[in-house]
Image (tube, coloured by chain):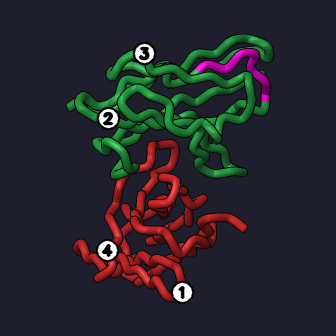
Amino acid sequence: DAGVIQSPRHEVTEMGQEVTLRCKPISGHNSLFWYRQTMMRGLELLIYFNNNVPIDDSGMPEDRFSAKMPNASFSTLKIQPSEPRDSAVYFCASSLANYFPDTQYFGPGTRLTVL
Amino acid sequence: RKEVEQDPGPFNVPEGATVAFNCTYSNSASQSFFWYRQDCRKEPKLLMSVYSSGNEDGRFTAQLNRASQYISLLIRDSKLSDSATYLCVVIQNTGNQFYFGTGTSLTVIP
């Protein structure tokens, strides 16, 4: 099993640019989660999907952030325009749960640096 | 008040020592609890679930204290490889909310 796959692993961009992070969940998992981790704030849930439908996006910081899950095997997190304070590690995770968050399997993360 | 709180540490302990961390939660409706481990610059990985009756896995013991609203993780005979950050996760049935703690850093010293 390949596990959760994220790309790119590292991204360096300049302020104002659009950034797109990608995630492929584990096959058969019904829930997908996007997190942001910083030293100051720890691990923050941004949004999660169940059966490709966004369930809770209350953690999305602002309108600059958007997430989509067009099918069961792919999701994107987009930041437009990016700002230096968006610099963080962004994790995608998936779980088997149909309805209730259960054991989550994390991808390796995307380390984003916005200059 | 935060939903979940952990002492960030760092905890620096010698090899072979026993160390324990707590994680307190604010909502008494919380139903499910987990401990995750995160190595430096890696992703979090599930360490163990926390059951009402307690849960033991080798040198690791997780316990739940509902009356005082905290979970604990006990590590016996610490190994160098136990050095990591330990995150607790609390899941509430109400509103399908779940929360990660900010983690407790452990360094096991030779």
Observer able to see residue B38 = yes
**Given the image, on which type of amino acid does mark 2 rest?**
Asn
Q: Circle 2 marks a residue in which chain?
A: A
Viewer-nearest of labels 3 and 4?
Answer: 3
Numbered circle sitting on residue B51: 4
* B61 lies left or right of A46: left
Label 4: element kind: loop
Residue where numbered disc 1 is placed:
B68
**Given the image, on which type of amino acid does mark 3 rest?**
Pro
Quarter-of-image position of residue A36: top right
Screen quadrant of the C terminus of chain A: top right
Chain B as rendered: colour: red
Relative image position of residue A24 (x, y in whole percent): 37, 23
Q: Circle 4 marks a residue in which chain?
A: B
**Residue positioned 63% across, 27% down in the render:** A112
Label count reads 4
* B28 lies left or right of B31: right
Between the residue at mark 1 and the residue at mark 3, the CA separation in whole angstroms equals 43 Å
Asked if the magenta segment contains residue A36, the reply would be: no
Relative image position of residue A87 (x, y in whole percent): 70, 31
Are the residues at dot 1 and dot 4 in contact (C-beta closer than 8 Å)? no
Quarter-of-image position of residue B103: bottom right
* B109 lies left or right of A88: left
Q: Alpha-carbon neighbours of circle 4 within 10 Å: few (<14), some, or many (≥20)?
A: some
- Compare residues B45 and B4 and report the one nearer the observer: B4
Label 2: element kind: loop
Residue where numbered disc 2 is placed:
A30
Label 1: element kind: loop
